[in-house]
Image (spheres, grey):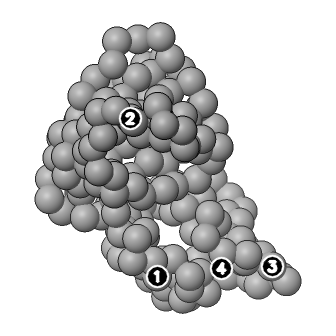
Amino acid sequence: MTPQARQVWLEHGEAFFDIAHDAKRPFVVHAGKQTVTVLGTKFSLYRDGDKLRVAVLEGRVQVQADQNRPAVLTRADTALADAGNLLLTKLSPQQLAASLGWLQGKLVFNEVSLAEAARQFNRYGRKQLVIKDDAASRILIGGVFDAANVEAFARLLHAGFGLQVQVHNEEIQISSPAS
């Protein structure tokens, strides 16, 4: 923080901001080659390598991907930025709530692959899900899950899909049933 600006660097992961607009001291988030300038808002950012997802709960933010022209997002807008590209979409109220579920410790999936669901769970816990085969990794998952309870998720995978679950120290291995 300086008298001229408020700046944050997001190296990786997810953050939620509730920022008051101050024209004399803009709030800027630097996330790799992308920058997000707050125009007074509540919003979340998720950075994974060079990819950035911005979801606006209320207010406005300006997103600039690499050297491209900036775009202004308002309530329920989302932006996906990757390697200089910027995709803007509007979220339904349900999609917006789902994208912010992590604030209450929930993971909300709507037809995502088990591989992606495992990746999201692995962000939150020490015990890691490891998907052992392609057939299992492509299974589509939907529902609301406690981000801190990967063991319960693994039990559901066994009960609902018949997947094999093996626990080894800090790893839960998931595989298709043996033929």
Closest to the camera, between mark 2 and mark 3, is 2
Query: What percent of the width, then of the height, locates residue 124?
Result: 61, 70
Residue at image mark 3: 170
Q: Are marks 1 and 2 in contact (CB under 8 Å)?
A: no
Amino acid found under the numbered disc labelled 2: Pro
Q: CA distance from mark 2 to mark 4?
A: 52 Å
Q: Secondary structure at mark 4?
A: strand
Question: Does label 1 or label 2 sit earlier along the sequence?
Answer: 2
Quarter of the image with the C terminus is: bottom right
Mark 3: give few (<14), some (14-19) or many (20+) Cα within 10 Å.
Answer: few
Question: Does label 1 or label 4 sit earlier along the sequence?
Answer: 1
Q: Is residue 55 above or below residue 108?
A: above
Closest to the camera, between mark 4 and mark 3, is 3
Q: CA distance from mark 4 to mark 3?
A: 17 Å
Q: CA distance from mark 1 to mark 4?
A: 21 Å
Label annotation for residue 55: none
Residue name at image x 58 percent, y 53 percent: 13
Amino acid found under the numbered disc labelled 1: Asp
Q: Secondary structure at mark 2?
A: loop
Would residue 61 be visible to someone looking at this image? Answer: no
Residue name at image x 37 percent, y 42 percent: 54
Query: What percent of the width, then of the height, locates residue 168?
Result: 83, 82
Amino acid found under the numbered disc labelled 4: Gln
Closest to the camera, between mark 1 and mark 4, is 1
Residue at image mark 1: 146
Q: CA distance from mark 2 to mark 3?
A: 43 Å
Question: Does label 2 or label 3 sit earlier along the sequence?
Answer: 2
Q: Secondary structure at mark 3?
A: loop
Label annotation for residue 26: 2
Q: CA distance from mark 3 to mark 1?
A: 18 Å
Question: Does label 3 or label 1 sit earlier along the sequence?
Answer: 1
Mark 2: give few (<14), some (14-19) or many (20+) Cα within 10 Å.
Answer: some
